[in-house]
Structure formats: C-alpha cells, structure tokens
Amino acid sequence: MIIIHPLLGPRDAQEFTYLGDASLIHRPDPEADNVAGTFYEYLYQRDNIAGEHRELWFHEQGDRSWLVIKRNTLTHDILSVELASDVARREGRSK
Amino acid sequence: MQYSAFQIFKQTLRGHVGWKPTWRSPDPKPQYDYIIVGGGGHGLATAYYLAKKYHGVNIAVFEKGWLGGGNVGRNTTIIRSNYLLDANEPFYEYSMKLWEGLEQELNYNAMISQRGIINLFHTDPQRDAFVRRGNAMRLHGADAVLLSQEALRKKCPFLNFDNARFPVLGGLWQPRGGTARHDAVAWGYARGADQHGVDIIQNCEVTGFLIRDGVCTGVETTRGQIRAKKIGVAVAGSSSRVMAKAGMRLPIESHVLQAFVSEGLKPIIPGVITFGAGHFYVSQSNKGGLVFGGDIDGYNTYAQRGNLPVVEDVCEGGVALMPMIGRARLLRMWGGCVDMSMDGSPIIDKTHIEGLYFNGGWCYGGFKATPASGVAFAHLLATDAPHDTAKAYRFDRFSRGFLIDEKGVGAQPNLH
Ligand SMILES: Cc1cc2nc3c(=O)[nH]c(=O)nc-3n(C[C@H](O)[C@H](O)[C@H](O)COP(=O)(O)OP(=O)(O)OC[C@H]3O[C@@H](n4cnc5c(N)ncnc54)[C@H](O)[C@@H]3O)c2cc1C
C-alpha cells in the first residue's frame, strides 16, 4: 500500500505504524461520570467496518506525524489522507 | 457409508462407482431447533457435537460460501496445547485430547500427525518464562520438555544457533503437538454432522436476524427467513460484520494473516518450529513443502490477502533462523481474515439477546481449538451454561477487567 502523505508525498505503508479506528482521537473525559463504561467502550469495542474505514497511522520512520486515512478494508484502496492534527481540531479537540 | 480398508477394496472391484457424496445438500427447512451460522471448523464441530449428544434435535449450518473456504482451509494446521494461563490451558489440552481420538470418532482420515512443536528461546529470562509455561502445562496434564541447546542441536542441527541478535539457546518442546490436515477436519466434521441428520446449507448467507423484544427467533438468509429456537454464530473473521446485524459491537478487529508454502523438499524439518522473536514459524507438509508464516499484517482488513512488507519480513525471519532454506522457491501464498480479539483470547458466550449465542475472537490460533470449541459451544447452546473448560471466555471480561492476556497478543499488541 502506498500512502500519499499530505506533506511528503507517496510513502510506502511499511514506514508507518497502525493504531486503528480514527475515533480513538476522542479519548473520553476521565473526570466524567461512568468513566469505567466510557473507557471500556473506548479501549475494547470497535466498529470493525467492512468497507470505508477511517483509521490512524503513525509515520514512525518518517516525519512522525499522525495521519487519518480513509481506506477500504475490502479492497485496500486508500481514499483520503489527512494530518490527524487537522482532523482533531476540526472535530473540536483543542490540541 | 463407513470408510475402511475393506470399503476401498470393495469399491475398487466395482470400479469406484459406489462412493456416495460425503454429505447431503438439502434445501433449508422453514424451522430448526438450532441454527449455526458459519460452516468453518468451529460451526461444523458445534453442529456435530450438538447432533451427536442431543439426539432428535433439528440442526442446520448456514455457510455463505463453501465448506473449507474460510480460515479452516487457510491455516497452517498447527495443533498444540502449550498455554500458560489457567483460563486457557485446560481448554486447549482438552482440545488436544479430542484431536488424539478424532479420526476414530469421525471415521475420517484427518492426517493428524503428532510430530511435536518446539518454541525457541534466545535469552535467560525467556528460558525462565518457558520453564514456567512448561510447568503450567504439566500441571494441567499436558506434556512439555525443556530442550537445552545441546538437545536441540541433535534434533535441528540446521538452526542458526549463533545468530548475533537472537542466539538460539534452546526450546520448549511439546511432543504431542503437531499438525492436522485442515480441510479434512472440516470435511470430517461435516460428514459426521450430516450422518447425525444436520442440514448443511452451503452458498447461503445469513443477512440478518429476526429479533423482537430482545429475543432472537431466526435468521434472514439469501434463501429466505428461517426460524430457530437458538442461533449460534461462529463466523471467525466476519464476526463484527455478522453481529452488527444484531446491533452488537464486539471487542474484535479483523486482520489478515498470511501463509506460505515452498516447493516440495526432502524431509528436513522434524516438527513445528516457532521463532517468535523473528516472526517466523515453520513445519513441513507430508508432500514436502515448507509451510510457514509469521505475524499479522497489522491493519484492519477483510480482503483475505496481505501486502509485500510482511512477505519480506517472514522470509527474512526464516532465512535468519535456517539459512539453508534461502534457496527454496516459494510456490504459493495466501491470506485469511482473522478475528483478533483485544486480549488475544476467544469468546464463547451468550449475548444480551435471548436465543443468540456467539463464538469468535480466535485470532490466528483457532484451528487447534476446533474440537473443544465445538464441544463447548454445543454445551452452551444446549444447556445455557458454559462448558467447564470455557468458563473464562466471556464477553464481560473486558468490562470487568478480567482479560486473558496469555502473552501480550491481540489486535494491537504494541510489542515493537
Ligand atoms: C494464514 C492462517 C494461518 C493460521 N494458522 C493456524 C495454526 O497453525 N494453528 C491454529 O490453531 N490456528 C491457525 N489459524 C487460525 C484458524 O484458522 C482460525 O482461528 C479458525 O479456523 C477459525 O474458525 P473457523 O474454522 O470456524 O473459521 P472459518 O473457516 O473462517 O469459518 C467461518 C465461516 O463463516 C462463514 N460466514 C461468514 N459470514 C457468514 C454469513 N453472514 N452467513 C453464513 N456464513 C458466513 C465464512 O464463509 C466461513 O466459512 C490460522 C489462520 C490463518 C488465516
């Protein structure tokens, strides 16, 4: 798989480490009520989608940026690549 | 038809026109007592043990493709019971015992070969951990032998003992471990289940569940609605997809594990050898091909095929451990979609929906579990209580904090 990095252009997927579903950007509030429940969902439960999947990749052997990649898990086609920091800010995270 | 040497002789004299299909291909009935979704090893074994133990019940297995098309026909055929934890070892040792009697039980040649499995170690602390595991195995009635480097040199003189990064110091050997012919296991269970009256419906996908007021009363299939009192799902890599149709999310990610076979070579590898540190394990098939693999590719996928970086990684591991195989040509490679649970251990449990049961999360190690998983899932379906050996394989262990962390595996082990 070739990942078109937004800053570095085409890079081999081998340079990256995979983390999983992009919803992991949104860590639950540890101060909220029912943290045991929200962290259980966050840590263990997954949608595990067959089809278009938004996921986190870390450019470990490159510029060490986190990316959000939309990829089809049935075909391995990569549909979009964004910096995770942009996605996180857009989705309301402050940093 | 009973298979035997006499039967072969008799059929030979008749010009082999008397052999019958190994199982029937009936049309689905509108209603069953039990429906098993998924005709892999686990689904077929479940149907077999259910039908055998609980006579007179109506059972159907629905398989969206053909028998043996899933992981049961894609794995590298290793069977073993070399686990550490109390939650695992009794279950896998029970499975090992069932393997030992399986061919007689099924009257089917599954080519079970107890040629032994050796896990290599490379450091003193790793040896200590293996000693502990071997002792745990023996406490649960399994067999385990610690091989010194000297003993290992006699068995496997071809290993690269002086590897600079991972010198081979010895191994933990389970002599009763070995291999079985993977699709013969599916066919043998299918034949046995069929003989006990189970309807095996191939090319029929379950597309939904009939659920009302928290009770599941049947399934939607590509051949219409079928009702049942109890429905058991055993669909391995498709677990999340299928259970999503019942509104459930699972602690599972689907990943790909690749496997490789070389050209046929003279007998050289004495059993199964695993080189965990180098992401490589190998055995030699009866036809002479080296059957080997390594780790999962490491990203979510349902594609049943992997990518080249892992091919390279596995082959590097193999050549580092056994330089002699460097010239063997690779004949075939493929991938299977494995159901990676978050702690690397399986689930055999009821769901919160009455009448709906789940069996999955087998990761890349569920082939060896096939017989015990079948018995345990049949027991759960029939009695609503977990089988003695499978009590820990519950959904709620994740929310309760009782993970079965055998050795830091699962979907994202973060080992490196
Ligand atoms: C490359 C590879 C190597 C492996 N090596 C080993 C090994 O050496 N030792 C070991 O113990 N384990 C190994 N495993 C793991 C083992 O193969 C699996 O854990 C085990 O086979 C899974 O159970 P199963 O046989 O029931 O799965 P499967 O054979 O995958 O059965 C599931 C079935 O469900 C069907 N299905 C899916 N969705 C539906 C639907 N909606 N309706 C109807 N049917 C459906 C599928 O078509 C499939 O046939 C390996 C796996 C792979 C991929």
Image: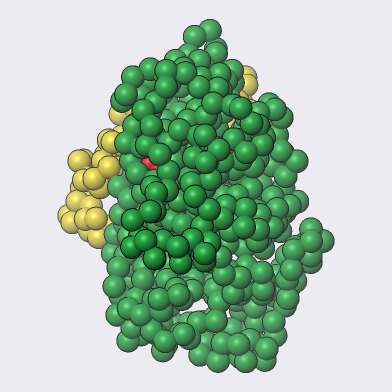
Residue appearing at x 29%, y 73% in the figure: B331
Residue appearing at x 74%, y 63% in the figure: B142
Q: Nearer the viewer, residue A39 or B387?
A: B387
Give the colour in which the image draws chain B: green
Q: Quadrant of residue B287?
A: bottom left
Name above or below for residue A59 compared with residue B6. Answer: above
Q: Is residue B366 visible?
A: no
Chain identifier of the yellow chain: A
Q: Nearer the viewer, residue B275 or A78?
A: B275
Farthest residue toward the front? B13
Q: Is residue B107 visible?
A: yes
Image coordinates for residue A19, horizontal then vertical, percent: 42, 47
Q: Nearer the viewer, residue B131 or B390?
A: B390
Image coordinates for residue B222, horizontal then vertical, percent: 31, 25
Image coordinates for residue B322, horizontal then vertical, percent: 46, 85
Image coordinates for residue B202, horizontal then vertical, percent: 36, 37
